[in-house]
Image: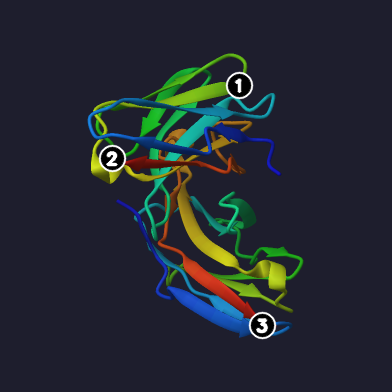
């Protein structure tokens, strides 16, 4: 079974600085998707960025980018120019391509990101 | 706002009781998934419905069951509640079975006493 590990329970960064959140995963599949979700205190999970494993190019969404290392099974999230609104729990998630998505998402335990003004 | 709503927001039940949680998805979202998020943990996949049929299930016992309706609403039913069922329950909908982008609701916080 696949597992997702987030080794940083909490991270703190100064406003306008850059922070990197770590995620590693374990799978025997060759085709899969990786996601970063943000969960603010409102509890609503919001998709931040998505990476398809077959794409070598790292995904980027405005201030958010990933460093995807398939051989190392590593998928880190970099947030540039951190803003107060970025404060939230961040979850790394995995989904196998096979099975038509019927296995759902596998989430890590999350990283609590604190933004210092 | 993701357009996915859940009710109720909070719920308190007693061990052994039954509970029904509801989710309303966006029009056209024919796939809905349910997740259980215990305090301080990431969400865990309970099951998925596609066009009103369950087509995927996580490691949850049969007392967790669901329904999906043609009007893009769905239910999660839990029988014989246990203390460990206390959690945030999230539903997520998408336009296809591949779940390339799931839209999550705000969740229902269930407390079992």
The image quarter containing residue B41 is bottom left
Provide the secondary structure element on which disc 1 rests: loop
Gap between marks 3 and 2 measured at Cα: 38 Å
Q: Give the residue drawn at x 48%, y 69%.
A: A111
Q: Give the residue drawn at x 70%, y 73%.
A: A84
Gap between marks 1 and 2 measured at Cα: 25 Å
**Rendered location of residue A41, percent (x, y):** 58, 58
Between A19 and B1, the one nearer to me in the picture: B1
Q: Chain of mark 3?
A: A
In which quadrant will I find the N terminus of chain B?
A: top right
**Residue annotated with mark 3:** A18
Q: Chain of mark 2?
A: B
**Residue annotated with mark 1:** B72
Decide which of tag 1 and tag 2 comes sooner along the chain.
2
Structural crowding at the residue carrying mark 3, measured as other residues with C-alpha within 10 Å and reported as few (<14), some (14–19) or many (≥20): some
Structural crowding at the residue carrying mark 1, measured as other residues with C-alpha within 10 Å and reported as few (<14), some (14–19) or many (≥20): many
Q: Are marks 1 and 3 on the same chain?
A: no
The correct choice, above or below, for B67 with respect to A8 in the image is above
**Rendered location of residue B40, percent (x, y):** 39, 61
Q: Residue furthest right?
A: A62
Between A1 and A115, the one nearer to me in the picture: A115
Number of numbered labels in the structure image: 3
**Residue annotated with mark 2:** B59
Provide the secondary structure element on which disc 3 rests: loop
Provide the secondary structure element on which disc 2 rests: loop
Between B72 and B110, the one nearer to me in the picture: B110
């Amino acid at each position: 079974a696949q597992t997702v590990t987030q080794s940083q329970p909490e991270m703190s960064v100064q406003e306008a600085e850059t922070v990197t959140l770590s995620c590693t995963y374990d799978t025997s599949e060759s085709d899969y998707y990786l996601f970063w979700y943000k969960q603010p205190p409102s509890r609503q999970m919001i998709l931040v960025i998505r990476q398809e494993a077959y794409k070598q190019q790292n995904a980027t969404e405005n201030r958010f980018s990933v460093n995807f290392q398939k051989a190392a099974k590593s998928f880190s999230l970099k947030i540039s120019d951190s803003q107060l609104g970025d404060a939230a729990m961040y979850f790394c998630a995995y989904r196998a391509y096979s099975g038509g998505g019927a296995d759902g998402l596998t989430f890590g335990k999350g990283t609590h990101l604190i933004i210092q003004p | 706002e993701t357009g996915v709503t859940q009710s109720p927001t909070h719920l308190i039940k007693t061990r052994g009781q039954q509970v029904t949680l509801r989710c309303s998805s966006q029009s056209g979202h024919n796939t809905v998934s349910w997740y259980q998020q215990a305090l301080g943990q990431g969400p865990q996949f309970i099951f998925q419905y596609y066009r009103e049929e369950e087509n995927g299930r996580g490691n949850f016992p049969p007392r967790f069951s669901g329904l999906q309706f043609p009007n893009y609403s769905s239910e999660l039913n839990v029988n014989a509640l246990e203390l460990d069922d206390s959690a945030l329950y999230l539903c997520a909908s998408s336009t296809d079975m591949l779940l390339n982008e799931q839209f999550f609701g705000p969740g229902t916080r269930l407390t079992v006493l």
